[in-house]
Image (cartoon, helix red, strand yellow):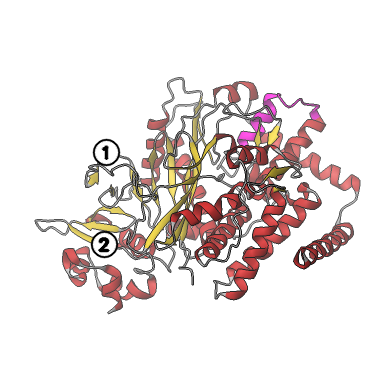
């Protein structure tokens, strides 16, 4: 049981440390949105055309 | 003390050609592999020492009368010691034997580069408008699955029953950090929008020999590819192919560590589940990671708590033995990932495929107001795994700095060419590089040379830790051709590593 508590406390410590670091380093809301928009636009530009047809025709034989 | 956990991965890749009405996956796979072979020698695969039908439980199928050298199969042995071939209807890359989990992750990634280059070469043979695509995934979303297997060297003296007993719950619960993510469910499992792994839906047995039907959590294939009196090769078939280097490292690193602990009797409790098969897909379907599962002796446990328990046992075990220092990193990464998954799975999106993919999908759903059954989400689900660096979405995430890498690209490219120096893969790879014209066949534990005499000369390599660079480089440097190598090794009965030791 002592071990269980120890594990619990280690996990709690790690958690709060990580949160603080994340808060300090995290970009502001607008910046995040811009970065996500840029990424999605980049993905848009490489995505296969005609998703429906592509997904329908993607059939593999089983393996292993 | 447990034996060194020599390890490697095998990946069957998805293959398709857009706009080719008579697409044939076997022909396309052959074309891809021949394209990579190019001017390289085509070395046949020898089946002499292979017996995929042998069962670790000791009551399995006879291994039958395999021909000595398998002809007609498209097969290339690479200078890095890997095997590239057509398996069923997929191109498959089987990595060389690696000395530790970090190296195994490196050579796994090198396999992706091999396939990407092979696909680019094969593309040039296609008609205008046709496009060859290779995916490092494990399911087509329509009920067909193909494998990503891991191999670990185990001591023969460890009873196989101990592996079944102590490894099953680790495998079932590790899915929380080994999954590559999948839209929907397959194989008659309950409907779900998104799940953690590609493969969980397909596992139907606890223990068994099959890999293509009724897939088991613990596979009993007993084909050691080495001295069968000392070793077994544990063939782990319940895992996803990962795009994330970090994730491959954590997957094989934690498994190797738990297996070493099992070998040394350091896992005190099997944490036996009441119903491992159904728990397998249930863990994969629960992206909240909060569900509890029944234990065989009563009580319940979450997948996360099972992983914390294995992590704790592995940490304690690592303190008592002299392991490769890379296992310290395994333990740190393992703890970090479990901590982040518990806080919020999204926090692991820089390291784990399933959360990275889910993140993109959620961002698309939000921006374009898409339902879960929108084909665009299934497309994202597939294209995440495209090995082409320009098209693959995981590559886009790495490029944009959203996902971590473990390796410099130059290191991965070097691993496409050069074998691991610390295992017998070194001898195999170097012989391919130096004596390809005389090397007529190869497999994991032998090489067969034609040096112009009446009989072929076979060089057995039954010890995975012989044939290493320190042991054979000097010998290879002193032999300008295969004939002098065979002579130096003492002909047919030569043992590359032993000879090099003396």
Frontmost residue, B205 versus A22? B205
Q: Is residue B115 left or right of residue B178?
A: left
Reading the image, the residue beneath label 1 is B72
Residue B443 location in percent, x, y? 31, 53
Q: Quadrant of the N terminus of chain A?
A: bottom right
- Checking the image for residue B460, the label placed there is 2
Q: Residue at x 73, y 51 (%)?
A: B348
- Principal secondary structure, stretch drawn in magenta: helix
- Residue B74: image quadrant is top left
In the picture shown, does residue B27 fall above or below B453? above
Q: What is the magenta range?
A: B368-383
Task: Inspect this view and state whether residue B475 appears.
Answer: no
Q: Earlier in the sequence, mark 1 or mark 2?
A: 1
The picture places residue B262, in percent across and down from the top left corner, at 53, 62
Which element is circle 2 on? strand
Above or below: residue B488 compared with residue B445 = below
């Amino acid at each position: 049981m002592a071990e269980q508590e120890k594990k619990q406390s280690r996990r709690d410590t790690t958690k709060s440390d990580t949160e603080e670091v994340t808060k300090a380093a995290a970009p502001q809301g607008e910046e995040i949105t811009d970065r996500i928009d840029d990424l999605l636009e980049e993905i848009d530009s490489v995505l296969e055309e005609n998703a429906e047809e592509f997904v329908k025709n993607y059939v593999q034989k089983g393996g292993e | 003390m447990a034996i060194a956990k020599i390890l490697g991965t095998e990946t069957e890749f998805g293959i398709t050609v857009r706009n080719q009405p008579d697409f044939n996956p076997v022909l396309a796979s052959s074309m891809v592999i021949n394209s990579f072979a190019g001017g390289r020698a085509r070395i046949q695969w020898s089946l002499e020492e292979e017996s995929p039908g042998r069962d670790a439980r000791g009551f399995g199928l006879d291994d039958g009368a395999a021909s000595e050298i398998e002809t007609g199969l498209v097969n290339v042995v690479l200078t890095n010691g890997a095997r590239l071939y057509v398996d069923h209807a997929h191109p498959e890359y089987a990595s060389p034997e690696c000395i530790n989990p970090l190296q195994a992750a490196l050579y796994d990634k090198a396999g992706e580069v091999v396939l990407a280059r092979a696909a680019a070469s094969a593309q040039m043979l296609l008609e205008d408008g046709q496009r060859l695509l290779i995916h490092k995934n494990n399911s087509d979303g329509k009920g067909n699955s193909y494998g990503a297997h891991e191999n670990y060297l185990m001591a023969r003296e460890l009873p196989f029953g101990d592996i079944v007993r102590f490894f099953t719950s680790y495998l079932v619960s590790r899915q929380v950090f080994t999954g590559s993510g999948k839209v929907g469910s397959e194989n008659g499992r309950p409907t779900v929008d998104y799940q953690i792994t590609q493969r969980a839906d397909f596992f139907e047995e606890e223990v068994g020999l099959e890999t293509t039907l009724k897939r088991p959590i613990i596979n009993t294939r007993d084909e050691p590819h080495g001295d069968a009196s000392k070793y077994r090769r544990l063939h782990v078939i319940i895992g996803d192919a990962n795009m994330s280097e970090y994730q491959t490292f954590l997957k094989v690193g934690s498994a190797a560590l738990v297996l070493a602990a099992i070998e040394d009797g350091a896992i005190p409790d099997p944490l036996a589940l009441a119903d491992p098969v159904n728990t397998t897909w249930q863990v994969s379907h629960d992206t909240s990671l909060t569900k509890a599962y029944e234990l065989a002796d009563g009580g319940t446990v979450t997948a996360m708590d099972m992983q914390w328990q294995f992590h704790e046992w592995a940490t304690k075990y690592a303190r008592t033995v002299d392991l490769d220092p890379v296992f310290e990193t395994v333990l740190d990464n393992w703890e970090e990932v479990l901590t982040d998954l518990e806080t919020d799975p999204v926090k692991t999106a820089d390291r784990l495929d399933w959360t990275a993919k889910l993140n993109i999908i959620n961002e698309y759903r939000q921006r374009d107001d898409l339902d879960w059954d929108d084909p665009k989400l299934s497309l994202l689900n597939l294209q995440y795994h495209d090995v082409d660096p320009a098209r693959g979405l995981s590559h886009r995430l790495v490029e944009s700095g959203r996902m971590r890498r473990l390796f410099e690209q130059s290191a991965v490219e070097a691993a496409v060419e050069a074998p691991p120096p610390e295992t017998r893969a070194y001898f195999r790879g170097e012989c391919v590089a130096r004596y390809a014209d005389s090397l007529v066949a190869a497999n994991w534990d032998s090489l067969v040379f034609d040096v112009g005499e009446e009989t072929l000369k076979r060089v057995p390599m039954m010890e995975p830790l012989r044939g290493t660079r320190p042991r054979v480089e000097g010998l290879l440097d002193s032999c300008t051709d295969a004939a002098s190598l065979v002579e130096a090794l003492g002909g047919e009965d030569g043992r590359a590593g032993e000879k090099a030791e003396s």
